Image: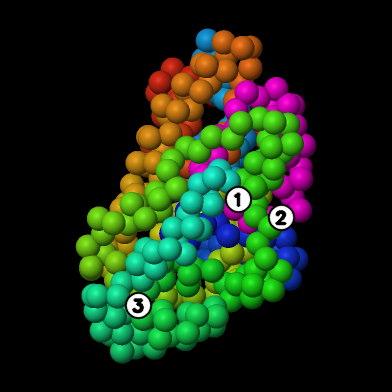
Amino acid sequence: MRFVSAAIFCLFSLPVAAECVGTNLIAEMPVETQARIDEAVAAVPFHRGNLWRATKDDAEIVLVGTYHFADFRHDAMMQRLAGALDDAALLYVEAGPEQEAQLTEALQNDPELMFDSNGPTLPERLTEDEWQRLSTAIEARGVPAIIASRMRPWYIALLVGISPCMMQRMTEKGDPGGLDRMLTARAEELDIPVRPLEPWDTVFSIFEDLTPDQEEDMIRANLPAAEYADDYAATLTEAYFDADVWRIWEFARFDAYETSGLPHEIVDEQMDLARAMLMDRRNQSWIEPLTTGAFEAAEDGKGIVAGFGALHLPGQQGVLQLLKDDGWELERLDG
């Protein structure tokens, strides 16, 4: 489920962007497949645009779809957001500094969050060929196979979606964070309160209802991408900075049709499940805090800014459509 890494982490950093090179895989696809991707993307509401304004009565929300790795091109977006941030009463992000600290502490204190010490190991759950491919991929990312064998499947699926080059650069130089971190840092400079859209442990609750078969299929579907993760990252990066992020979602679907070895209906089932878990349910839960915060800020003549992963913006259950359904007027600001 290579698209999971795009939806959850979108892990990019400036050293990575400068030193890890990949090919845009969409451009390498047959023209007929590209046309099918275009058709699928066109049917999705608000599929283009990373920067929007939502207004209702006197309330205003400036919404920016973020990219969680650093990149020098974020500077242009920060310049566009300068006025909105200067005048904002609040900044909403998926997880603020306090939530990140809570997550780090929890992982240090409770290894069971990432490891399953009681159930069958991954070599026991996968075929021999699948485990060999997985162990090769995970060791290339700096994780010994013996340790990976006890990791929770969803976490393994995420890890193999990150290129070895990226992992190495982050290990060597650290992860300076992406647009989310830049927004938070600027808000702190301006003494603007930063509020989280969800609890620190959301990432764990997302996957807790998966069946064993669904967990294993996550790994199987993501294995082909492990061999060209640099290219996948480049593809995602270009789609994001072209303000066309939903294209990466549909690309993942058609790529999985060709490379995962799974029937199309299973791929579609996984895509639907992932969208529901990773985006739809979370989007729905964000509307209340966003709108409440905006109306409270309006009482003081201010607006709010909200920054979260760009894949949360488009779609029938995307944040933009949900706001529209609630009577908010929407204006694209980066078009």
Dot 3 alpha-carbon crowd within 10 angstroms: few under 14, some 14 to 19, many 20 or more: many
Image-quadrant location for residue 44: top left
- Residue of label 2: 71
Query: What is the CA distance from the residue labelled 2 to the residue labelled 1?
Result: 9 Å
Span of residues in magenta: 68-95
Q: Looking at the image, is 254 positioned above or below residue 243?
A: below
Residue 267: % across, % down: 32, 62
Please state which amino acid type lies under the numbered disc 1: Tyr
Which residue lies at the image location 50% right of the left edge and 47% below the top edge? 99
Dot 2 alpha-carbon crowd within 10 angstroms: few under 14, some 14 to 19, many 20 or more: many
Residue 296: % across, % down: 52, 16
User: Which of these two is toward me, 184 or 240?
Assistant: 184
Mark closer to the chain start, 3 or 2: 2
Q: Looking at the image, is 312 positioned above or below residue 145?
A: above
Mark identifier at residue 143: none
- Residue of label 1: 67
Query: What is the CA distance from the residue labelled 3 to the residue labelled 1?
Result: 30 Å
